[in-house]
Image (cartoon, rainbow, N blue to C red):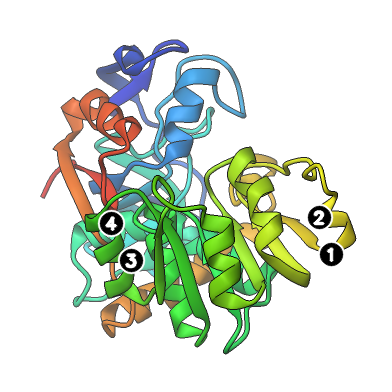
Amino acid sequence: MKIKAIVISGQGGPEVLKEQDIDLCWPAGPEDVLVTLRAAALNPADVFFRQLGGYVDQGPFVPGSDGMGVVSAVGPDVTDLSVGDRVCFCNGGIGGAPGTYAEAAVVPSWQLAKVPDAVDDLTAAALPLVAITGWEALYDRAGLAEGEHVLIHAGAGGTGHMAIQLAALRGARIATTVSSPEKARLAESLGADLAINYRETDFAAAARDWSGGLDVALDNVGEEAMRRSYAAMAPFGRVVTLMGVASDDEDLTAYNMNLSILNVMMLTPMWLGLRPQMAAQAGIVRKSLALAAEGRIRIQHAETFPLGKAAEAQSYLESGQAVGKVTLSISG
C-alpha cells in the first residue's frame, strides 16, 4: 500500500527530510497490526540518525520511533487488539523498517499499548521513548530508592521532565539542571526539589552542597556534564548515562569514590531484534500510560507541527528552545 511519509534522503541538516510516497508492506506477518497514525513524537535520536545514518542501513529511511494511532487491520494471529483501538508504541525509525513520520505503520501486536480514554493523542505519542528511557535508567539500572538524592540533567527536556516525575514517584529527593527560570518552574512543578541554572551556577558544587553527596545522577547531556557530575557523588554512587561513558576526571573521582557507571541505550533491543527486551519495554509503556491516565505523570508539550513540516520541527528541537516534547500531528 502507498502512504505519505517523511524520508531521510541523505545525511545532513533538516533539508534532507523529504515528503514522498512510499510503499508500506501490508498484509505483513500474522502477529502484525496496521496502525493509521494520528501523531508522532520527535526525539534527539531522530536528529542523530539524520546526521549520521541509521543503525540498520545507511540508505534512505523514514525516521521516528514514537507513534500513536488507530488500528486499521490486524494479522490472523492477533487476538488482543481490534480495528478502532487507539494504540501507541515505540518501534522503527532506526533504518530499515519505516518509522513514525508517516501516515501509517506496521507494528507487532505485542509492541502495542492500548491508550486509555483519559490520555489524549499527543500525550500517547510523546510518552513511549521517554518513559522507557527514564524507567530503565532510574528504576532498572540505578535502582533508585525512596529518600535517595538524585541529579537529573536537562530537567525541562523530553527525557528529563519524565525522569523527574518517575523519581518523584519513588519518593526520591530530586535536583535538576536547567537553563532558564521558565524551565526551573516547570521542573519544580513536576517534583524537583532543587533546580540549578547551570549557566549561572556550578551545578556539581550546588548538588553536592544540597545533598551531601548524590546517590544517583542521570546524564542525558554528554561527556562534560557526566564528568563534572562525578564530583557531586557520594561514595558508591551510581551514574547512569544515555550518552556514552565519559572518562574519569583529573582527580580520578569516579575510581576513588567507587562509582558505578551504567549505560542505558534503550534502542538496543530494537536494533538487535531482542524480542523479550522489546516486549518488556512495551510493558513499561503500558504501565506509564496507566500512570498518565491517573494523573500521576504527564507530558509537557512544547510545539506541534504538521507532518509536512517535519524539517521545521527538527530544527526547532535542535535549537534548544523546546520546553518538553515536540510532536507531529498526522491525521484525525
Give the CA separation, mark 1 to mark 3: 29 Å
- Residue 16 vs residue 51: left or right? left
Identify which amino acid the numbered label 4 is placed on: Lys
Contact (Cβ within 8 Å) of mark 1 with mark 4: no
Would you name the residue on which mark 1 appears?
257
Q: Of marks 4 and 2, which one's residue comes earlier in the chain?
A: 4
Q: Of marks 1 and 4, which one's residue comes earlier in the chain?
A: 4
Contact (Cβ within 8 Å) of mark 4 with mark 3: yes
Label 4 neighbour load within 10 Å: few <14, some 14-19, many 20+: many
Q: Of marks 3 and 2, which one's residue comes earlier in the chain?
A: 3
**Quarter placement of the N terminus:** top left
Q: Of marks 1 and 3, which one's residue comes earlier in the chain?
A: 3
Give the CA separation, mark 4 to mark 2: 30 Å
- Closest to the camera, between mark 3 and mark 2, is 2
Q: Is residue 202 visible?
A: yes
Instruction: Establish if 208 lies above or below 271.
Output: below
Identify which amino acid the numbered label 2 is placed on: Thr
Numbered disc 1: secondary structure: loop
The disc label shown at residue 253, or none? 2
Numbered disc 3: secondary structure: helix
Q: Residue furthest left?
A: 332
- Residue 163 vs residue 224: left or right? left
Would you name the residue on which mark 3 appears?
187
Would you name the residue on which mark 4 appears?
183
Q: Foreground residue, 253 or 294?
A: 253
Q: Is residue 4 visible?
A: no
Give the CA separation, mark 1 to mark 2: 6 Å
Give the CA separation, mark 1 to mark 4: 32 Å
User: What residue is at 48 percent from the left and 74 percent from the top?
Assistant: 174
